[in-house]
Amino acid sequence: MTAQLVLGLLLAVSTAHAATFYCDPINGSLQGDGSNARPWRTIEEVLQARRIQLRDRAGNPANPEAPVKPGDTVLLRSGWHGVIRIAQGYNDQFITIAADQGHATQVGWIEIGEGRKWCLRELTVSPSLAPSPLACISHHFLPTRSRSTRKKHSCRLESKTAPGR
């Protein structure tokens, strides 16, 4: 009986539903919990605060306490979200970063140095959308390594030469 209970608990944990988190650059706060009612502010702040779990190639999390884990989705509401910069993030399930339904989401650029299983959807990507000039403009939106496990769906990409280039 005890073995069946333990097996049942293990199965329940392994089949837990993925979570959805929210960012709202107008009404959000990094002190929020990422819920619909208490969203974080921008995806750039969420990444800098290490609220998205990032794993090395072997699958070991660098920040195991992060609320956003592989399989989860972060929905972005209308407005400027900064840049999406991930130095290293290997996932066993996709982490999705997407515009919330009916929202116009803006990011300056997307840079994923190393990683797999990142899904980006319905984002408008252009450094020219920044409210003030960006300090550094990435030379690429998506790097060349491990492309097979990165997805971008319905993203609008714009490229403009930075002043002085």
Image (cartoon, helix red, strand yellow):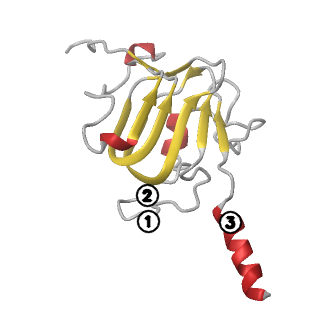
Location of mark 2 (residue): 55
Residue 158, picture quadrant: top left
* Label 3 element class: helix
Q: Earlier in the sequence, mark 3 or mark 1?
A: 3
Could you tell me the amino acid type at mark 3? Val
Q: Report x, y in % for residue 99.
A: 58, 26
Q: For mark 2, give the secondary structure.
A: loop
Answer left or right for 37 relative to 15: right
Q: Residues within 10 Å of mark 1 (few under 14, many from 20)?
A: few
Q: Amino acid at mark 2?
A: Arg
Q: Nearer the viewer, residue 143 or 164?
A: 143
Query: Local crowd at mark 2 within 10 Å, few (<14), some, or many (≥20)?
Result: many
Q: Position of residue 109 (x, y in %)?
A: 39, 27
Residue occupying image coordinates x 28% and y 36%: 143
Q: Residue beneath label 1, please?
A: 60
Query: Badge 3 local density, few (<14 within 10 Å), some, or many (20+)?
Result: few
Point 42% across, 35% down: residue: 151
Left or right: where 99 falls relative to 55 = right
Name the image quarter holding residue 43: top right
Q: Position of residue 54 (x, y in %)?
A: 46, 54
Image quadrant occupied by the C terminus? top left
Task: Give SS at disc 1.
Answer: loop
Nearest-to-viewer mark from 3 and 1: 3
Pointer 2 with pointer 3, Cβ within 8 A: no
Q: Viewer-proximal residue, 92 or 2?
A: 2
Which image quadrant is residue 137 in?
top left
Q: Which mark is residue 13?
A: 3
Q: Would you say residue 83 is visible in this rendering? A: no
